[in-house]
Amino acid sequence: MKTLLLAAVAAAFLVPAAAQAQDTTSDGSRKFGIDPYVGVMGGYEGFESDPGHGIPYNAPGNRLKGGLVEGVAGVNVPLGSFFVGVEGNAAKGFSGDVDWEYGVHGRAGVRAGETGLVYGKVGYQWVNFDRYGPNSGDYGRISYGIGGEFGPSAVGLDGLVKKEGVRFRAEISTRGDFETVRPMAGVIAHF
């Protein structure tokens, strides 16, 4: 009876410790819970130049494009090897025709290796153009894309940070019926 009681007490202490050890992945992030993040990205967006198409509908020779600096904030909900989440963004054009962009997207994906995430996203994105003046309207369309994130250790930069809370991100997205192309890259900090 004493042996059974000692085994039960030992199990009561060991089971929660084992469960606690398995609540994180090999990169130190949580397997389950809430994973908030913020980031800064840069890139380019080119809009369709075919007359009568695009965002907004184009006149001949009206090729809209521009360089962007973007801030993103969101939250992932890890589900073991998978995750779902939501992300908001705001971008400022620094060259070309884009003044501001903003949007919100849902994301879903899988973990890749020790530090990576591969995902797809869909949402809605608005854009305002410098070319149309300070009081011009915002043009919105459904937006979708694919992307990935990876930690510094994935590219041999193990000493850069102590924890894989910082990841590099690259993604490409489009709007409507492939009316734009928008490659972006940047740094994301997970908390």
Image (cartoon, helix red, strand yellow):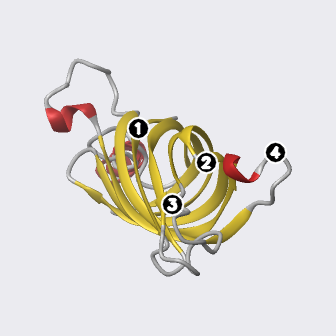
Residue at (44, 63) in percent of width and height:
173
What's under tag 4, amino acid-wise? Pro
State if disc 3 and disc 1 touch (CB < 8 Å): no
Name which quarter of the figure residue 156 lies in: top left
Q: Earlier in the sequence, mark 2 or mark 1?
A: 2
Of labels 4 and 1, the one closer to you:
4
Q: Are marks 2 and 3 in contact (CB under 8 Å)?
A: no
- Sort mark 3 into few (<14), some (14-19) or many (20+) by Cα contacts within 10 Å: some
For the residues labelled 4 and 1, say whether their Cβ atoms are less than 8 Å apart. no
Q: Which residue position is annotated with label 4?
A: 134
Q: Residue at x 47, y 39 (%)?
A: 41
For discs 3 and 4, the disc positioned in front in the rendered view? 3
SS assignment at label 1: strand
Q: Quadrant of residue 83?
A: bottom left
Q: Can you identify the residue that label 2 sits on?
A: 98
Comes first in the chain, label 2 or label 4: 2
> For residue 63, which numbered disc appears in the image?
3
- Residue under label 1, please give it: 186
Residue type at numbered disc 3:
Arg
How far across and how far down the image is residue 49, in percent? 48, 69
User: In the rendered structure, which amino acid carries the disc numbered 1?
Assistant: Gly
* 42 relative to 101, above or below: above
Q: Position of residue 26 (x, y in %)?
A: 26, 43
Q: Earlier in the sequence, mark 2 or mark 3?
A: 3
Give how far apart the Cα atoms at labels 3 and 4 are.
19 Å
Tell me the SS state at disc 2: strand
| CA gap, disc 1 and disc 3 | 26 Å
